[in-house]
Amino acid sequence: MRYHTFGDDETDLEVGVPVVEAVAGRGRVAAGELPGGRVVVTIHEGGHDRLAEAYTRLQEGVAAHGSPAGPAWEVYEWIDLTTQPDVSAWPAPADWRTQLIQPIS
């Protein structure tokens, strides 16, 4: 997930999955790439009810190492993207591991 805006009433985000080769978009679905360059990464372990704390750590890291350069994104290491998504196969939220990634300049 890459968040462009996050608000109480409306959120603009992208959902992405890794692919072996480029694919064409269609309709409201567009192909894209994550940017290269410097990033700050924070790892959050556990359910997303405490994800805001991880974002605070991410912002502290950004302040120490640069300035934000585009929207942040999340990588959900606990979702197996090599198979058809099956929520019933996901681990308990306590076992989730999520990367928070913020490009910096």
Image: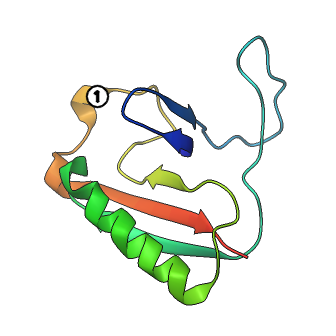
Residue at 15% in and 55% down:
94
| Viewer-closest of 51 and 98 | 51
| Viewer-closest of 30 and 7 | 7
In the drawing, does residue 99 fall left or right of residue 17? left
| On screen, residue 83 above or below 20 | above
Residue 100 point in image, percent of width and height: 46, 62
| On screen, residue 45 above or below 84 | below
Q: Name the quadrant of the C terminus.
A: bottom right
For the image, the number of numbered tags is 1
Within-10-Å neighbours for mark 1: few <14, some 14–19, many 20+ = few
| Viewer-closest of 47 and 50 | 50
Residue situated furthest top in the rendering: 27
Where does label 1 land, which residue?
87
Residue 18 point in image, percent of width and height: 64, 44
User: In the structure shown, which secondary structural element does the residue marked by tag 1 occupy?
Assistant: helix
Q: Name the colouring of the figure.
A: rainbow
Residue 66 point in image, percent of width and height: 64, 82
In the drawing, does residue 54 fall left or right of residue 70? left
Residue 77 point in image, percent of width and height: 41, 54
Quadrant of the image occupied by residue 56:
bottom left
Residue at 33% in and 66% down:
54
| Viewer-closest of 82 and 16 | 16
In the drawing, does residue 88 fall left or right of residue 12? left
Quadrant of the image occupied by residue 72:
bottom right
Residue at 77% in and 65% down:
36
